[in-house]
Image (tube, helix red, strand yellow):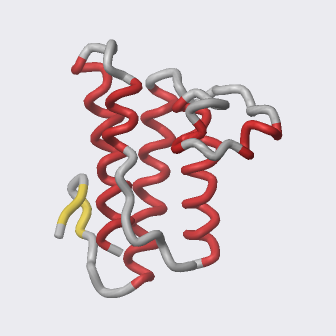
Amino acid sequence: MTVSGEVISSKGPEASHDGLARALRELEAELASAGLWEEPWPEPSAFESQQPFCVDTMSMPQWLRYVFIARLWALVDARATLPASCDVAPAMEVWLKDVPAARKAPLLEKLAEVDQIVTRA
């Protein structure tokens, strides 16, 4: 199987963690390129939100950086079990609804790749 031109083996968790690490680096780079990485650190209470994606306490880029990506990196670093499924790209697409397709497509592609790697694991 290929993802972004790189062959990804589906032979166990090590391949999943390595593929996810690569995809997370690419997602971080794309967020930076789109000007969405340098988000301020949320207030500590923002992390206590009970809403999906912390929509009541954080912007979507804040949640991606400080919750979603941070948690996935922790799982990669620990070689821990990944979530059973992941479907974050559609939420980001809604958040970016007013952004021209050409500008949001690369970011959504990278996020969808992370979704796919986690779900395949």
Q: Which x, y percent locates residue 113?
A: 31, 53
Task: Tell me if residue 88 comes above or below residue 94 in the rendering.
Answer: below
In the shown orientation, is residue 22 left or right of residue 32?
left
Q: How many marks?
A: 0
| Residue 75 percent coordinates (x, y) | 58, 69
Q: Is residue 28 left or right of residue 87?
A: right
| Residue that sits furthest to the front in the current view | 50
Toward the right, the furthest residue is 44
Foreground residue, 108 or 34?
Answer: 108
Q: Quadrant of residue 109?
A: top left
Whole-percent x and y of residue 87? 35, 52
Image quarter of the N terminus: bottom left
Q: Which is nearer the eye, 91 or 8? A: 91
Quadrant of the frame with the C terminus: bottom left
- Seen at 55% across and 69% down, the residue is 76
Residue at the spot 59% in from the left edge and 41% down from the top edge:
65
Residue at 55% in and 50% down: 68
Q: Nearer the viewer, residue 92 or 113?
A: 92
Q: Position of residue 111 (x, y in %)?
A: 37, 45
Farthest residue, direction left = 1
Q: Quadrant of residue 98?
A: top left
Q: Is residue 9 above or below residue 111?
A: below
Say whether residue 34 is left or right of residue 37: left
Looking at the picture, tell me which residue is in the foreground, 78 or 83.
Answer: 83
- Seen at 64% across and 65% down, the residue is 74
Examine the rendered structure and indicate whether residue 54 appears above or below residue 4: above
